[in-house]
Image: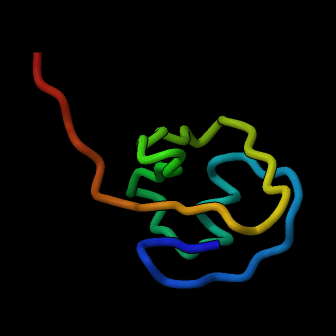
Amino acid sequence: MTIDRHRKEIPVGKYTGATLKQALGVPADHDLDQVLSGEFIEITDSATIVLEKGGEHFVSHVRRGGSS
């Protein structure tokens, strides 16, 4: 799998968004997105992610704050 265009090896299995970020080395204060068919899918810290084959692609970025 890749994270920010860098290859990373972690075991396949079930992760929460928070534990996946930790396994990938993403800072806790960053967002994590999975890239599927060119679309960026946000992974929340409480989401459940199942890694099945190891070919997944992820990107991390500074959280975007919203204003109201």
In front here: 4 or 68?
4
Relative to residue 59, is residue 55 drawn left or right? right
Colour scheme employed for the rendering of this structure:
rainbow
Q: Residue at position x 42%, y 72% from top? A: 4
Relative to residue 48, is residue 58 drawn left or right? left
Circle count: 0
Q: Position of residue 12 (x, y in %)?
A: 86, 65
Q: Position of residue 29 (x, y in %)?
A: 39, 56
Check the image and name the residue furthest to the front: 37
Up/down of 43 relative to 31, above or below: above
Q: Quadrant of the N terminus?
A: bottom right
Q: Residue at position x 70%, y 58% from top? A: 19
In front here: 56 or 13?
56
In front here: 18 or 7?
7
Image quadrant where residue 54 sits: bottom right
Q: Residue at position x 40%, y 61% from top? A: 60
Q: Position of residue 47 (x, y in %)?
A: 66, 36
Up/down of 27 relative to 51, above or below: below
Image quadrant where residue 27 sits: bottom left
Relative to residue 27, is residue 17 drawn left or right? right
Q: Residue at position x 32%, y 59% from top? A: 61
Up/down of 7 relative to 60, above or below: below
